[in-house]
Image (tube, helix red, strand yellow):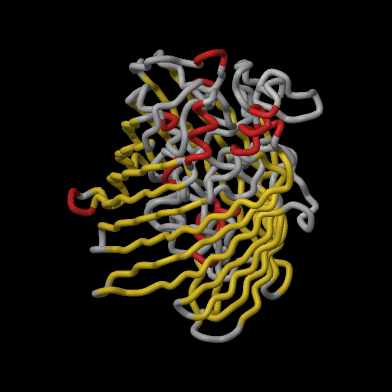
Amino acid sequence: MLLCAAFSATTAQAENYPDLNDDDEFSLMRALSDHGLHDLKDERWNAYSQATYIANFKPSFPAAYTNLNGTTNSLSPFSEYGFTATFTSYIGFKMWKGGEFYAAPEMISELPLSGLKGLGGGIQNFELQKNGTEHSTWYLSRAIYRQTVSLGGTSEEVKSGPMQLGGTADSRRFVFTAGTFSILDIFDRNTYSADLRRQFTNMAFLTNAAYDFAADARGYTTGLAGEFYFDDWAFRFARIAGPKEPNQLQLQYDILKYYGDQVEIEHKHVIKGQPGAIRLLAYRNYEKSGSYSDAIAALQADPNKNATTCTSDTFSYDNGNASAPDLCWARKPNIKMGIGINMEQSLTQDIGIFFRGMYSDGKTEVYSYTAADRSISFGTAMKGLRWGRRKDTLGLGYAQSWISSQHVAFLNMGGVDGFIGDGQINYRPERVVDIYYQWHVISSTWVTFDYQHLANPAFNADRGPVDFYNARIHFEF
């Protein structure tokens, strides 16, 4: 399910990634450039890396019940400690005019709280992956071919960075991407709430919590994307592969049979000298998924079609509640759709604000992202210029998620989806406040202290609220 956020933006959003080549930061590319061995303004190749460790602590919290009647997806009410550790290298080559190849090998080690169960749209650590372990796991997160076709306009500088070769690009261009990547490398970017290795740590601020984009259990996919830029406007579209089974690693590569489509339109603007942007995003998945209403109907028609009797050749979440419906009895080709908005605005040189909101139809199970059907998030980030710490950042965000009436009915009968299910539910929206301070310690090193307060975990007012205390150390080089 879950996602390592993109460490950098693509050439489309050059302003979003941290500049490791300024006077205060170290990078191999800058060191080679200083010795006349590399041209940062016209790169044929580059290489960057990052390492991030996030520690999570949750004290005990009140709960009227936990894993009622044999269900399996409650957040533990006892105190817990968890962590994630990731390392990624980003390697890029220019092969011909406009043609670039990139690869990003990655490692993760993790210990999720409660086995990554019991939270809806507000999972406290965005790095967590559904199938991760405490042992180090290596994989290729990205392997792409990118072709840029220049169409005129003004020439813009593209700074050297991860997954981005230094050079220039026309303000009017078409960019084609094919291979393995995260769809969030391209879609739903936001200056103040997207790069969670340096910003918020709660997943509700990585993208729209209700954006159930097609991806494997690590958050990556294989597919095709196109981006058309015309000065301040951008139009994007993509078709990508989803998992063969919900929230699992193996992808369904036949994107003519099952697929995830998305389109996005963006307009950048300037208000009183300060930049901003508005983006509209829509997605449509066609996958072999389970409808909540169909699962309930199957149980009502035949009590033997319950959560404990799923056959060995059907995927299930091993729910032990014999009176509960199960999505294993309802999976068939289904369509899931959603539409959302993403806004950002700089207010001053050091303060920016953001807002996201998305409405998904909520008829079928979560297939790749969080257990939310509708979501909003908003907040602000302030750089430390006012207190003499220009590379520090203070952030405050609020996020809220909802689920559909069908989803509520399914959970209230004891059903579970990929992440939530307490056995019954006293439905309320799930709400989270996330406050962080990012401290620039030394060159290329940041330490972040993060506090989160989450009400109604898994949309259940009978449990919580719960607090999370997080610490993150992040290196870039």
Kindly indicate the quadrant of the structure image that contains residue 2.
Answer: top right
Q: Residue at x 55, y 51 (%)?
A: 28
Q: Residue at x 66, y 22 (%)?
A: 307
Q: Is the residue 25 above or below the residue 1 in the image?
A: below
- Residue 51 seen: no
Q: Residue at x 54, y 61 (%)?
A: 282
Residue 377 appears left or right of 167: left
Depth check: give the residue in front, 315 or 143: 315
Residue 123 appears left or right of 238: left
Kindly indicate the quadrant of the structure image that contains residue 185.
Answer: bottom right
Task: Give percent across and percent down for residue 473.
Answer: 42, 35
Task: Give percent across and percent down for residue 189.
Answer: 47, 58
- Residue 56 seen: yes
Depth check: give the residue in front, 236 or 395: 236
Depth check: give the residue in front, 44 or 203: 203
Q: Residue at x 72, y 44 (%)?
A: 288
Q: Is the residue 153 above or below the residue 311 in the image?
A: below
Q: Residue furthest left?
A: 386
Task: Give percent across and percent down for residue 216.
Answer: 66, 42
